[in-house]
Image: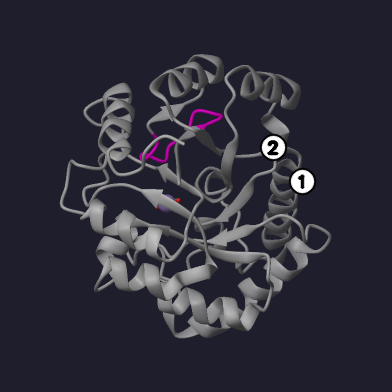
Amino acid sequence: MKLSIVLSTQPASFSALAYKGELEKNLAKIRALGYDGVELAVRDPALLNLDELRMLLDRYQLPVAAIGTGQAFGEDGLSLTHADDSVRRKAIQRLRSQLALARTLNAKVIVGLLRGLCPDQSRLKAMERKLAVSLTVALRGFEQVQVVIEPINRYETPLLNTVASALRFLDRLGLEQVGLLLDTFHMNIEEPSLPASIRMAGDRLFHFHLADSNRWHPGAGHVDFPAVVKTLEEIGYADFLSAEILPMPNADAAAENTIRYMRRLVPAM
Ligand code: LER
Ligand code: MN
């Protein structure tokens, strides 16, 4: 397994991001701390200078673990299940531009809050069907890019809160390229047992987010990370563990404490 940390390519209102903006400075820090890669949170690929980004990723030798898309919802209000079809189409287009970026950077694409909220909870099943249609349209032509659906806790969205519901959704969706991203912060709220849910995800697990129970760096709360890592090893997960954490007590300390704590569990390759 490899360790990465999320860096937002732009300033962002989402709080669980240790590093935001200042690409060169932050990529240099991430490299110097000994991370194996970086996860990029990208509001809109159109806002990026791709040549500069590639040059910096190359200079600091950081592969891109995944591309997060949540800011398209958080900052721009786009959603794959939006009641207004013109907004839903914009969300599909945004996701397609993220898939194109991911294809060039050899990264996965995360579908978290871009799925939307579902204000009328009696329509959850219909919203899941709408999400499946939007995803099928968005992914057409990008079959080689892996996409991950993240179960997110009930306080952020009612759509797909648990590993079991997300796996049922994947079965109905029927696209091999789509798997799960599990996040220990959400799992701590929704799952009865983190190891049991990791086992349930099994080979559908494509990506992983680290945060402790309080969304601080691993080691600051009560998530049993040794048990989490042991279970990931047991199911043969060999990809990135990406820290998506609050900048507490500050960004540098959060990033440094994460790698110090996690390296004891995940030796450098
Ligand atoms: C994004 O990966 C995440 O975990 C969510 O909490 C975003 O709202
Ligand atoms: Mn997450």
Mark 1 surroundings within 10 Å by alpha-carbon count, few (fewer than 14), some (14 through 19), many (20 or more)? some
Residue 33 vertical position relative to residue 4 in the rendered view, above or below: above
Q: Residue at x 26, y 64 (%)?
A: 189
Residue 92: within the magenta?
no
Q: Which residue is mark 1?
A: 100
Foreground: disc 1 or disc 2? 1
* 166 relative position to 250: left or right: right
- Find residue 195 and report its horizontal and vertical position in percent: 30, 67
- Find residue 43 and report its horizontal and vertical position in percent: 59, 39
Q: Residue at x 68, y 30 (%)?
A: 47
Q: Are marks 1 and 2 in contact (CB under 8 Å)?
A: yes
C-alpha separation, residue under disc 1 versus residue under disc 2: 9 Å
- Find residue 52 and report its horizontal and vertical position in percent: 70, 19
**Main SS, magenta residues:** loop
Residue type, numbered disc 1: Ala
In the picture, the disc for residue 45 is 2
Mark 2 surroundings within 10 Å by alpha-carbon count, few (fewer than 14), some (14 through 19), many (20 or more)? some
Q: Residue at x 35, y 71 (%)?
A: 197
- Find residue 202 and report its horizontal and vertical position in percent: 47, 71
Residue 16: within the magenta?
yes
Residue 182 vertical position relative to residue 262 in the rendered view, above or below: below
Q: Is residue 215 visible?
A: yes
Q: Secondary structure at mark 2?
A: helix
Residue 103 vertical position relative to residue 132 in the rendered view, above or below: above
Q: Which residues are magenta?
A: 8-17
Q: How many marks?
A: 2
Q: Earlier in the sequence, mark 1 or mark 2?
A: 2
- Asked whether 116 or 172 is in front, the reply is 172
Q: Is residue 82 visible?
A: no
Q: Residue at x 59, y 81 (%)?
A: 171
- Asked whether 136 or 32 is in front, the reply is 32
